[in-house]
Image (tube, coloured by chain):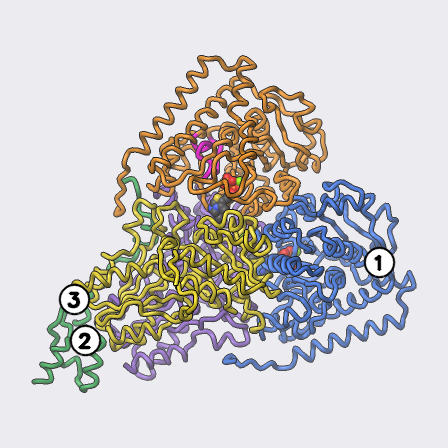
Chain colours: A green, B purple, C yellow, D orange, E blue
Amino acid sequence: AAHSPAASGAAGAAAVVRSAGPAMASILNRVLAKPPVRKIAKELGIDLSKVRGTGGGGEVTREDLISYQAQ
Amino acid sequence: MTTMTIAKAITAGLRRVLEQNPKSLLIGEDIGKLGGVYRVTEGLQAGFGEDRVVDSPLAESGIIGTSIGLALRGYTPIAEIQFDGFVFPAFNQITTQLAKMRSRSEGRFGAPVVIRIPYGGGIGSIEHHSESPEALFAHTAGLRIMVPSNAHDAYWMIQEAAASQDPVIFFEPKRRYWLKGEVDTENPAPPAAAAQVVRPGRDATIVTYGPLVPVALAAAEAAQEDGRSVEVVDLRSVSPIDFDTVVESVEKTGRLVVTHEAPTFGGIGGEIAARVSERAFLSMEAPAIRVGGFHMPYPVSKVEDQYLPDIDKLLDALDRSFAY
Amino acid sequence: MTTMTIAKAITAGLRRVLEQNPKSLLIGEDIGKLGGVYRVTEGLQAGFGEDRVVDSPLAESGIIGTSIGLALRGYTPIAEIQFDGFVFPAFNQITTQLAKMRSRSEGRFGAPVVIRIPYGGGIGSIEHHSESPEALFAHTAGLRIMVPSNAHDAYWMIQEAAASQDPVIFFEPKRRYWLKGEVDTENPAPPAAAAQVVRPGRDATIVTYGPLVPVALAAAEAAQEDGRSVEVVDLRSVSPIDFDTVVESVEKTGRLVVTHEAPTFGGIGGEIAARVSERAFLSMEAPAIRVGGFHMPYPVSKVEDQYLPDIDKLLDALDRSFAY
Amino acid sequence: RPDAAAQAFGITPEDYMLPTRGQIQIIDEQGRVRPVAEQGTAPGHEYPLPEGPELLAAYERLVVGRRVNDQNSALVRQGRMAVYPSSHGQEACQVAAALCLREDDWLFPTYRDSVAVMTKGVDPVEAMTIFRGDWHGGYDPTRHKVGIQCTPLTTQLLHAVGVAHAAKLRGEDTVVLAMCGDGATSEGDFHEALNFAAVFQLPVVFFVQNNGYAISVPLSAQSAAPSLAHKAVGYGMAGERVDGNDLVALLAVLDRGVELARNGSGPLLVEAHTYRIQAHTNADDATRYREDAEVQAWLAKDPVTRMRAYLREGGLLDDAAEERIAAAAEATAATLRAGMNAEATIDPQD
Amino acid sequence: RPDAAAQAFGITPEDYMLPTRGQIQIIDEQGRVRPVAEQGTAPGHEYPLPEGPELLAAYERLVVGRRVNDQNSALVRQGRMAVYPSSHGQEACQVAAALCLREDDWLFPTYRDSVAVMTKGVDPVEAMTIFRGDWHGGYDPTRHKVGIQCTPLTTQLLHAVGVAHAAKLRGEDTVVLAMCGDGATSEGDFHEALNFAAVFQLPVVFFVQNNGYAISVPLSAQSAAPSLAHKAVGYGMAGERVDGNDLVALLAVLDRGVELARNGSGPLLVEAHTYRIQAHTNADDATRYREDAEVQAWLAKDPVTRMRAYLREGGLLDDAAEERIAAAAEATAATLRAGMNAEATIDPQD
Ligand SMILES: Cc1ncc(C[n+]2csc(CCOP(=O)(O)OP(=O)(O)O)c2C)c(N)n1
Ligand SMILES: Cc1ncc(C[n+]2csc(CCOP(=O)(O)OP(=O)(O)O)c2C)c(N)n1
Ligand SMILES: [Mg+2]
Ligand SMILES: [Mg+2]
Ligand SMILES: [Mg+2]
């Protein structure tokens, strides 16, 4: 079309998308959790890798910590 | 396979550009008879003549402004700015003209000018000879920014820059000019926009480019002795940035340290830390930690070692990261 | 208490500077008889004479370079750059000279020059009249950068800039020049380096400055309807940045959105996101989200509304933040 | 080299470079040819009167140019364009700047040079796109060899020099004409452009339209030089001053300047004295910085009236031609109206 | 204003501005006074010979300057300084640039002007700090009215103009002398500085040391102007060319230039023809771009030898004075050695 994108040059040329995202991370046994959850886990002495994450992509949530503690 | 210094790898790359693209030409201060103050263009005027290797008057805006005109008529000017600190007289031409030509011409004219700049500190020099202004150009949309860290990349990336249809700022890590490495003149390096994992690791990721790649590798080596497996990513291109590779690494390691010589404040490390922290948020065991220059003018050579990121500062950053 | 537009508040502030500091003077293009293209200096030459309000030749490097000399002899030059896009010819004088004078002179001479720049988009103008280059100056150590967002701040901050012993880049949000507000000419505004919480909130923090403060406030208002209590911080100073205030806010709210008109890539938003994410890491319920311009030259006026951060984009950013 | 050109004129290189003490004027303000001795030339440096057909064709472009200026100003008032820096009063410069060039020669204009851009062949509507906010450019610079109008003053002069450098490398005999205003001569890039062109002996004609003001700033606050053309000396190039409201003199001087550049004499600097009758742009208020008497005095020197008087007097312009020319002007105005009133659709995703 | 100065000399303003066709030389290469008619001046523009005591004092500074250059080069070789751009061969310019000024006048030097800086009164060791890597400055600019040496070429010229602007506003009669090299004249800031100075009619003497090269680039690739002094014309200021190895001529020309500026004639441009005998800096290899024969030819024009011959011939310099001067030079060299060999301690936290 008439107007080609201004900076497509600079922006559009990033390398092939290789990131497999959180899925890959969980395969690699990287626990997904937001920092405050990590903080709570640390304070409670919970090893996050032992907790089953129920959030998106296996994210460990505050609720997961609570149910893990309840176990 | 030949062993070359980074400086001579660039010379060889430029020679190949001049041989293969009859419309390519070099322009800059003292690049002809003298071969440049770092001798990167040594022998090229003798080989290709004064029309292809042009000693310009002493005016950086003139060099870049006329390069734009040359490019408009089908030439590929490869301009040299003598030192990082002397690119600023050309800043207007670079930001308001060179970077915007593609947009202004509705994509008809991409202004394929390459600007070579020996950059960075650690050479014991006087003021204005040790600057790292890459963030200023990265924030200016419309430019590609390449920074090789080794001879093989230098040889190939300068050729990629010359072939680019967009303008390229080609930062040459001057304190590594004499760093030798193997150059395979048959097999091209990956495109600049593809960051490379130059050392694999599991526990943390250091992201850097140019002169600090060897420092990051050495820090990773030292960390190994403490039982920490550190991955090192060489960005190679600072605009665009290959975030996919970095994010993939950080999703694996959970920790990110970014380092460059430029001041941390407002530096490109902020972009990397922010973007990667956003994309890999849930994987971050610790906040992204940046190791850069202080927010002050580049200091005198007597104390530059204390200013520059070094192995100790990187190890300290790793410690801070692992403390979370 | 008087109601004034931002433009006239700056005029009033400049008038007060000229009255109180006999060594202060204004210099720039068309600032005399014409009173500046935005009339910010209107009436000042008539009131203070041609020696105090100087119409300079048309050369930005000349304006800043000679201002440095004037400052060296005890004057306080307040230079006007006619539009944001025309500061770049002076970039060399600003970065290699003005910003480094204090360091170069071992603190003996701070180069107290103020550079006023009407900046930002949203005015339906042609190319080079809508730029937001604050990140380029923020990354340049040695400069203070102030950006008022309302008339009261404008009135006081220009006076603070003129009194500063360091050089100040004073960005005036030109699309808000006609925004009216109460100015209390008796009670000074807090120092520029103190960010202000301009709307308190509990659930998320929006950090911004200058022209987007009203947009952020409107977005917070709209978010309130969804039951989200959003705090808005007006930085006021982009270098240095009052991180304490921002960190305190984010430690409370757990969510951060940063917005500015400049392209996100390499923008000062990266610095804010990275630094705050580091300091408030364990409080972050979501990654810092940045809302800025695209990484492209500022677009034509017909589509600038799609380029600029607006309420919808901020609400969308809040949604993304709350989705974590 | 200037030396060679000087030799051709039988004068010293220094005299060749030094602008004549006055300005070149061939047609006076009443439209009469001035005696050669009073045209302002140095001996050996006289200009031949351009031929009738060239002048008639130029007059047509002049009338069209005036119409374009007034139409565009009207379109701005109607809100069809954001801004228009009119060259009303400067049309003789605009027209001559384009007409002195061959089709394959290049023109590097600024924001006030829309009439020159159109005269060089660019479609009027495309030429106006930049002021409409549809796109920062508007036309293909390579099609009619017209650089895109640069707003940051004098940046375009260096691009022009680069294009001339390319012409030299390619062995082409094309010439580049680079335009700027009097105020713009204060910028560093003006200096660097002239110097590069002179050092590399490139075929560039630098054409300064001195309209006496940079927005509100009068020339006296811009330069202390005897004339802007005198700046040529500092680069080792020739400078010439010309009455910028005398289309005949402009064509004579620019035609020769282009020819000299084409033949390898290196760059030249031509300063034209003219006046912008209207405000800087529609956003400007010129009454703040100049007297109406001054405007009136310049109205009396109007380039269109003057050229018309000369052509009619000399029998080069008859009623039929006038009608044809008026129709051409109207046609262009209609094109502009139609083009500017049509809604352009821009897809920002595109 | 130049007009007034021209009137004082009984010449036209244009002739006043136009540099004399040749250069001013008062003492020839053998140290003999040239006949007035052969000194290169235009009628009405002759220079008086400076007085004996002024010349003797200047000679002392010349000898000290040479010693400083050679001592510093030695210190670089010994690794006590990182780099030194020597003015060996240019000492007459260095010395005259400082001596033509009053104590309260300002000097704005570049990296090659350490000898001028010291001559203006700055402590030698402080003046060399910049090349030692201890600090980017080294001295207090306000103490001896000497700007800090700027490396980005010609940035200092604008600072100089600003200081002159301040002098004018303060109603002081101080003068500013601003230095740069031949190559530096190509930078945009050179142009902007000259123009600002001329427009505001400021008391600045721009002093260009034309040593024929910008690192490796010869003047012919830098400028096509008849001379660099001719650049004055384009700003409406006077230009003068002077033999830069003739200390007598330099003092005559600069003394008058400073006086004119002090009396309100506005800025001037003085170009001195000289030669850098050594490489650009110790890091440079001058054999790559110039012939030894050229260096030899310039060695024969050495400013020190020539001045000494003239003074001895005229009985202004005797053995006792020579001894005293040599001792002063040695003392300065010893100061430099002591200062540079002492370890400076820098606390980066400080
Ligand atoms: C680098 C730069 N600085 C400032 C401006 C703002 N500006 C636009 S036009 C103008 C005046 C130009 O005067 P002149 O060169 O005489 O041209 P004229 O408008 O008279 O045709 C100014 C100051 C600009 N466009 N670019
Ligand atoms: C803006 C800028 N560009 C480039 C340089 C690098 N540089 C330092 S000295 C020099 C040559 C200067 O030549 P000239 O002005 O003739 O002075 P000289 O060295 O001969 O005294 C160059 C190119 C610089 N210092 N500043
Ligand atoms: Mg410049
Ligand atoms: Mg004008
Ligand atoms: Mg030189």
Label 2 belongs to which residue?
A31
x, y percent for residue E104: 71, 65
Side (left or right) of C109 relative to E334: left
x, y percent for residue B42: 54, 56
**Callout 1: few (<14), some (14-19), or many (20+) C-alpha neighbours within 10 Å?**
some
Of badges 1 and 2, nearer the viewer stands 1
Q: Nearer the viewer, residue B181 or D190?
A: D190
In contact (CB < 8 Å): disc 1 and disc 2? no
In contact (CB < 8 Å): disc 3 and disc 2? no
x, y percent for residue D187: 55, 48
**Callout 3: few (<14), some (14-19), or many (20+) C-alpha neighbours within 10 Å?**
few
Residues shaded magenta: D104-118
Side (left or right) of C287 relative to D108: left
Q: Amino acid at mark 1?
A: Pro
Q: CA distance from mark 1 to mark 2?
A: 86 Å
Side (left or right) of B196 relative to C22: left
For numbered disc 1, what is the local secondary structure? loop
The reply to whether residue C78 is visible in this rendering is yes
Residue under the point 26% across and 44% down: D347
Q: Amino acid at mark 3?
A: Gly
Residue under the point 33% across and 55% down: C295
**Callout 2: few (<14), some (14-19), or many (20+) C-alpha neighbours within 10 Å?**
many
Chain letter of disc 3? Answer: C
Whether discs 1 and 2 lie on one chain: the answer is no
- Residue B244 sits above or below residue B323 on the image: above
Label 1 belongs to which residue?
E50
Side (left or right) of D170 relative to E344: left
Chain letter of disc 1? Answer: E
Q: CA distance from mark 3 to mark 2?
A: 32 Å
- Which quarter of the figure has residue B231? bottom left
Q: Nearer the viewer, residue D137 or B105?
A: D137
